[in-house]
Image (cartoon, grey):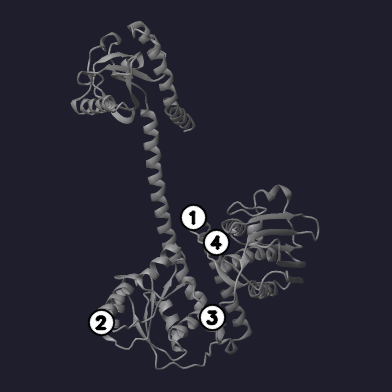
Amino acid sequence: MSNNKLTYLELENKIQDLETQIIHYKNLLASSETHEDNSIKKIMDSIPGFAFLKDSNLNYVQANRTFCDLLHIPYEQIRGKTDYDIFPKDLADKYTNDDKKVIQTGKPIFVEEVTVDQTNKGKRFVVATRKLPWKDDEGNIIGIYGLGFDITELKEIEDELKIAKKKAEKADEHKTIFLSTMSHEIRTPINSILGITDLIIQEENKLSDEHKNYIHIIKKSGSLLLNIINDILDISKINAGHITINHASFSLKDLINKIFHSIKVLLEQKNNDITLIESLDSNIPDYVVGDEFRLQQILINLLSNSCKFTEEGYIKFGGYLKNNNDIEFFVEDTGKGIKEEHLKLIYHPFTQAEQGDNREYGGSGLGLTIAKNLVELQGGTISIESRTDENHGTKVLFTIPFVEGKKTIQEEKEIDLSLKLSNKKVLLAEDDEINRFLVKTILENIGINVLIARDGIEAVEIFKREPHIDLIITDSQMPKKTGLEATKEIREIEKAANTNKHVPIIMLSASALSKDIESSYSFGVDVYHTKPIKNQELLKTVIRLLKL
């Protein structure tokens, strides 16, 4: 393959140098006062590539050996021939028209075309030719001359590259479909596990301590599995260039505080004597513009690593203003540290500092890879300092540019779970029995009347015959008719009715791919929730859309 690439570059360079060579050899030809055969032959045979001369009647006057060898024409027999003596009529017509254009306009042309060697079983090859006017001493055009190269090998390589590109695009398309399908197939049962676990936890005062422990183990294991799936999907999206960085105003102080409490819970589960410290520079504006979700993801990934590898001491994180637009964040711990020889490998996907770490501490080995890519996607840089000396641990620094923002987000009202909404009717379209039971239970717990559809066709039929549906919740992938198809049809029914009625639609999907999210909104979905759905988040969305 490397040889092909060299050949490709060599041929490409020859074509780029063609214009310079043409000028040089044009001057040589012009300096031949008599244009006698021997003088012309000597000059033309020194030309790299092929060369030919034609008179004003487009008869060949002379050609070099490269040209004759290319077409298997004896060197001595080229004089007096026309293109019609050498090539098929369709090619000869084209070459003649090109030659006439040069003579009529006095301007050179460049052509890249397929030609045929009729003496060699019609072998086809590709040539790149520059045709220029041939002038006498007084500047009169007396014919044309051409110089060029056989670029067949170059074109074959180009064609191979095009085929390889198409295959890569097709493979990427299949990969995206596979990820979307696997995301649905894996997230759907996780949604059931975590959702029903949350329902049980709401009633845990009725459970024994032993059963409470079992439920929390299930919740923790399900969450761990979800994190691994999310990591794999994220690294796939990063590699495919499907990650989008959003810019919105948010409170950095609130985000740091939220992360602090999440990590605090994680450390309490380890029952280790580790102090968690947050430190945020007071010079940082209260609100900044950036991607809150991705920043949280980076910090959680880094802090999760610190939690895994730190048994005592402290974990400290926060940020300070580096200059007017850059904030440098840090995560520092007194954990086991990373050996110097392993530092250069830590950003590699599915890699942990030592081979046994994934067995002892768990995880996918993608956290740092994802963090590095997300930092760089936001125009930032990341670095790691680590020592394996006792209580020295690891320090990760990353810088991301931010601008000052404004407070735009209103605080959400606390949900009153004792609220009874018996006057509200929700259509739930879900083919998975367990997920259907889960969402139905969540809604019925606050008194909502739930209508059930097991596929998209049934959902549309229920919508047609039930005049007072207040909200629709639909799964994205259902048999017979998908959630998107059902949404599109429902929006068309509303439009045809001409009543300005708009029933809010929540799409529940296992796909976190941006193209699926964008597609859903374009079909008329109001809110897109990625599975697994947290019960509280779903209730907040339902109540907001019902305008309560």
Apparent side of residue 359 relative to residue 456 in the rendered image (left or right): right
Q: Which mark is residue 425?
A: none
Q: Which mark is residue 241?
A: 1
Q: Position of residue 393 (x, y in %)?
A: 76, 59
Q: Position of residue 296 (x, y in %)?
A: 61, 68
The three-letter amino acid code for the residue at tag 4 is Asp
Q: Are marks 4 and 3 in contact (CB under 8 Å)?
A: no
Residue identifier under label 4: 231
Mark 3 Cα-neighbour bin, 10 Å: few <14, some 14–19, many ≥20: some
**Is label 4 in a helix, a strand or a loop?**
helix
- Tell me the distance, in whole angstroms, between the alpha carbons under discs 2 and 4: 45 Å
Total numbered circles: 4
The three-letter amino acid code for the residue at tag 1 is Gly
- Tell me the distance, in whole angstroms, between the alpha carbons under discs 4 and 3: 23 Å
Residue identifier under label 3: 198
Residue furthest right in the image: 390
**Is label 3 in a helix, a strand or a loop?**
helix
- Tell me the distance, in whole angstroms, between the alpha carbons under discs 2 and 1: 42 Å
Q: Which of label 1 and label 4 is nearer to you?
A: 1
Q: Position of residue 81 (x, y in %)?
A: 22, 15
Residue identifier under label 2: 497
The three-letter amino acid code for the residue at tag 2 is Ala
The three-letter amino acid code for the residue at tag 3 is Asp
Q: Who comes first in sequence, dot 1 or dot 4?
A: 4
